[in-house]
Image (tube, rainbow, N blue to C red):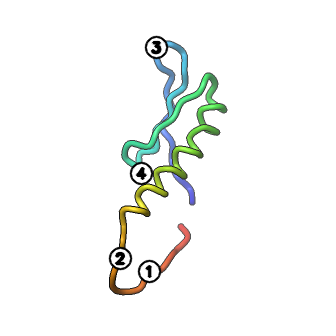
Amino acid sequence: MKLQLHIEQDEVGYFVVEVPALPGCLSQGKTKEEAILNVHEAIEGWLEVMNSKNEYSKGELVEVNV
């Protein structure tokens, strides 16, 4: 999965990374590289939480790679 990240440096100097396609999914780091590494965990957590909210009782669940 490819996602675009929005990165900016805050007033304290930390880099904040937001994933626009995943509302509320963000992370930070002391460097841009650290922030990008940290956001991977945030993305995994976001997807896990959203997946757990989707309980289907009928029909077929199909996965696709994007």
Inspect the image, locate mark 1, and give the three-letter code of the amino acid beneath it: Leu
Q: Which residue is mark 1?
A: 61
Label 4 crowd (10 A; few <14 / some 14-19 / many >=20): few
Sequence order check, earlier mark of 3 and 1: 3
Say the numbered circle drawn on residue 11: 3
Label 3 crowd (10 A; few <14 / some 14-19 / many >=20): few
Where residue 41 sits: x, y (%)?
A: 58, 45
Where residue 9 sits: x, y (%)?
A: 51, 22
Say the numbered circle drawn on residue 56: 2
Sequence order check, earlier mark of 3 and 4: 3
Left or right of residue 55: residue 48:
right
Inspect the image, locate mark 2, and give the three-letter code of the amino acid beneath it: Tyr
Q: Residue shown at 54%/52% (left/top)?
A: 44
Sequence order check, earlier mark of 1 and 4: 4
Label 1 crowd (10 A; few <14 / some 14-19 / many >=20): few
Q: Nearer the viewer, mark 3 or mark 2?
A: 2
